[in-house]
Amino acid sequence: MGYFGCHLSASGGNAAMVKTALSIGANTFAFFTRNPRGSKAKKEDPEDEAKAMAMMKEAGFAPLVAHGAYTMNLCTADPEARAFAASVLADDLRRMAALPG
């Protein structure tokens, strides 16, 4: 079976994204892990993550795709900006460990 999905808004949380994906017949989706322009991340919600995982498992979801913030630039010459980008990337990878992908 192939993968079908789209980019979804994360504003309603993980379970809401899964519900939206299911409503269009998708079995995966992409989303921003945090505000794409400001890099601020929502507080994690373990209950929401567990609900999303259960729905994805039941529906046979494929791995998800996380889209990093636009403000991340690991290739910048500015050491402070590079450290910020590395910190944001590490946090996003940790957050994604709670979801498939």
Image: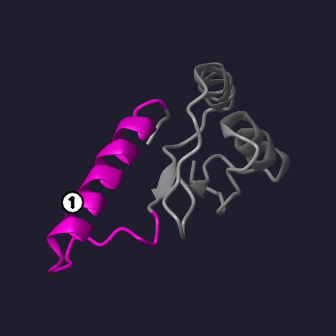
Q: How is the image coloured?
A: one colour
Q: In this rendering, would 65 be left or right of 42?
A: left
Q: In this rendering, would 26 be left or right of 32?
A: right
Q: Residue at x 60, y 49 (%)?
A: 28
Q: What residue did someone put label 1 on? A: 83
Work out which residue is located at the far bottom of the displayed protein and give it.
77
Q: Nearer the viewer, residue 83 or 24?
A: 83
- Residue 92 part of the magenta segment: yes
**In this view, 38 is above or below 53:** below
Q: In this rendering, would 10 be left or right of 78?
A: right
Label 1 sits on a secondary structure element that is helix
- Percent position of residue 42, x then y: 59, 43
Q: Nearer the viewer, residue 88 or 58?
A: 88
Q: Chief secondary structure of the magenta span?
A: helix
- Percent position of residue 45, x then y: 61, 27
The quadrant of the image that shows the C terminus is: top left
**In this view, 90 is above or below 6:** above
**In this view, 66 is above or below 91:** below
Q: In this rendering, would 18 be left or right of 34?
A: right
Q: Residue at x 85, y 47 (%)?
A: 23
Q: Residue at x 29, y 46 (%)?
A: 90
**In this view, 70 is above or below 62:** below
Q: Residue at x 65, y 19 (%)?
A: 47
- Percent position of residue 25, x then y: 78, 50
**Neighbourhood count class around disc 1 (C-alpha, 10 Å): few under 14, some 14–19, many 20 upward:** some
What segment carries the magenta color?
69-98
Q: Nearer the viewer, residue 81 or 96?
A: 81
Query: Which amino acid type corresponds to the residue marked 1 in the rendered image?
Result: Ala
